[in-house]
Image (cartoon, rainbow, N blue to C red):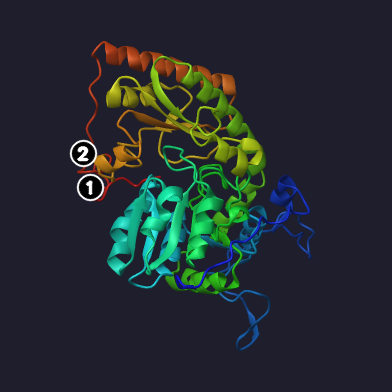
């Protein structure tokens, strides 16, 4: 890791790929089989590969924990979509986070945005701390990053948009300041996908995704990925990927690769749907506030226009409902198309209450300081018809608020100390 007295040159915006996103999504990492002509690579389930002599495998693979044909194909595709030189796939988004943080020496310091994914917050505060890595959270990272930098600072962690308040960060501004001090910048791009935003183009050093969400897009795979340009990062992170064993199965890699071939189509439709729903919510008297970067009213709309493809807002949004926590819970029970469930980015539309579900493990005062109030509802718009989704939201909103005003609602209490239904107990919610 470069020390703070050795600046890093912020990379310029990458040149546009020779081929468009859709072409790369369909063809990158998908060579035709030379022996059969199959246009889709086969699933390679073998755990081990033959060698012609000791230490000389027949091809590029020796053992599937270290590498596998399906994983290599998937990594090639993600690297192409994120304008990266390298990509490494992991068994989950949390595993990708783990490997990156494990690459830091004990005594290292990390600066992170405050309204971060619940699982990342848990890792930073409970796991990283245990192996000697300190994390400082800040709600205005572009403004005060220099105030938090120390000689021990090695990494800056950004989510843009953030989960679940959809705040945006000017990646180039943060990367420029961090690189002056030799600090690497990681951007979690899960909420937008490579189709809408490419953080490496804006100066980030590593981009991470929960592949489970938009890249796979069908709610049937748990995976993660990290993409970057540095050969040194490849050496260090690939070593940890293999040593820690946090690797995805060949079948999951094959499924995620197949899902990503339609990412551009799904991301466009999800954005169209979320935009329609956001406008409907913004016009409703039953809504306190709407968080969606595709709206002109969003405080960071100018950043979206600079960083996002065509200024797209993506498929995620959140809003505060009148009637408090009880109304938020009831809203999620009254939807007919939106499913009450954690996760996001699939073809189906989902809704949830972050304070009781994905972010329940974060203390209330910390949650509310960054806008995660008990009345906040998070929505993931899928690829259904926009008019159906808009109507579903409006009918659930009308009924939930009416019941709250009539005094019919009593919020349900979680069974665990901080978890949902007692599953997670004192350790808090899973945070998806």
Q: How many numbered circles does the render carry?
A: 2
Locate residue 8, reporting x and y percent: 55, 67
Left or right: 362, with 12 as reference point: left
Secondary structure of the residue carrying tag 2 is loop
Considering only vertical position in the picture, is 212 above or below 392?
A: below
Q: Which residue is mark 1?
A: 425
Q: Residue at x 43, y 70 (%)?
A: 103
Compare residues 42 and 125 and report the one nearer the observer: 125
Considering only vertical position in the picture, is 55 above or below 393?
A: below
**Disc 1 from disc 2: Cα separation:** 8 Å
Q: Residue at x 78, y 61 (%)?
A: 36
Q: Which residue is mark 2?
A: 415
Q: Residue at x 28, y 40 (%)?
A: 420
Is residue 121 among the parts visible in the rendering? Answer: yes
Locate residue 289, reporting x and y percent: 41, 25
Q: Residue at x 76, y 56 (%)?
A: 38
Question: Can you tell which mark lies on residue 236?
Answer: none
Whichever of callouts 1 and 2 sits on the residue coming sooner in the sequence is 2
Q: Residues within 10 Å of mark 1 (few under 14, many from 20)?
A: some
Locate residue 153, reporting x and y percent: 40, 65
Locate residue 288, reporting x and y percent: 38, 22
Compare residues 389 and 104 and report the one nearer the observer: 104
> Where does the C terminus fall, quadrant-wise?
top left
């Amino acid at each position: 890791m470069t020390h703070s007295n050795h600046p890093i040159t912020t990379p310029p915006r990458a040149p546009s790929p020779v081929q468009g996103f859709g072409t790369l999504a369909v063809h990158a990492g998908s060579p035709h089989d030379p022996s059969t002509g199959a246009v889709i690579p086969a699933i390679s389930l073998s755990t081990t590969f033959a060698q012609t002599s000791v230490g000389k495998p027949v091809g590029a693979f020796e053992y599937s924990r270290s590498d596998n044909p399906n994983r290599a194909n998937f990594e090639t595709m993600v690297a192409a979509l994120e304008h990266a030189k390298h990509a490494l796939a992991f068994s989950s988004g949390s595993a990708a986070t783990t490997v990156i943080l494990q690459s830091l020496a004990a005594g290292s310091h990390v600066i992170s945005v405050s309204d971060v994914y619940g699982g990342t917050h848990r890792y930073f505060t409970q796991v990283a701390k245990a192996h000697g890595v300190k994390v400082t959270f800040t709600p205005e990272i572009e403004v005060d990053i220099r105030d938090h930098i120390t000689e021990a600072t090695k990494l800056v962690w950004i989510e843009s948009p953030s989960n679940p308040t959809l705040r945006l960060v000017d990646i180039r501004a943060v990367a420029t300041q961090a690189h002056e001090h030799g600090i690497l910048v990681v951007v979690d791009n899960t909420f937008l996908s490579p189709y809408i935003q490419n953080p490496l183009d804006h100066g980030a050093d590593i981009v991470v995704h929960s592949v489970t969400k938009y890249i796979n897009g069908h709610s049937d795979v748990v995976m993660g990925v990290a993409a970057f340009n540095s050969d040194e990062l490849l050496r260090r992170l690939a070593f940890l990927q293999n040593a820690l064993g946090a690797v995805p199965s060949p079948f999951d890699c094959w499924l995620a690769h197949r899902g990503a071939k339609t990412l551009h189509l799904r991301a466009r439709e999800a954005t169209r749907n979320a935009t329609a729903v956001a406008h409907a919510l913004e016009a409703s008297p039953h809504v306190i506030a709407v968080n969606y970067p595709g709206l002109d009213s969003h405080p960071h709309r100018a950043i979206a226009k600079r960083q996002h493809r065509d200024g797209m807002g993506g498929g995620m949004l959140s809003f505060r409902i009148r009637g408090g926590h009880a109304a938020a819970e009831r809203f999620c029970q009254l939807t007919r198309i939106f499913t009450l469930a954690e996760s996001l980015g699939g073809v189906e539309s989902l809704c949830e209450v972050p304070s009781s579900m994905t972010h329940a493990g974060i203390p209330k005062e910390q949650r509310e300081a960054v806008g995660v109030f008990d009345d906040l509802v998070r929505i993931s718009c899928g690829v259904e018809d926009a008019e159906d989704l808009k109507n579903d939201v409006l009918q659930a909103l009308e009924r939930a608020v009416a019941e709250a005003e009539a005094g019919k609602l009593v919020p349900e209490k979680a069974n665990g100390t901080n978890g949902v239904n007692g599953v997670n107990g004192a350790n808090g919610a899973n945070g998806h």
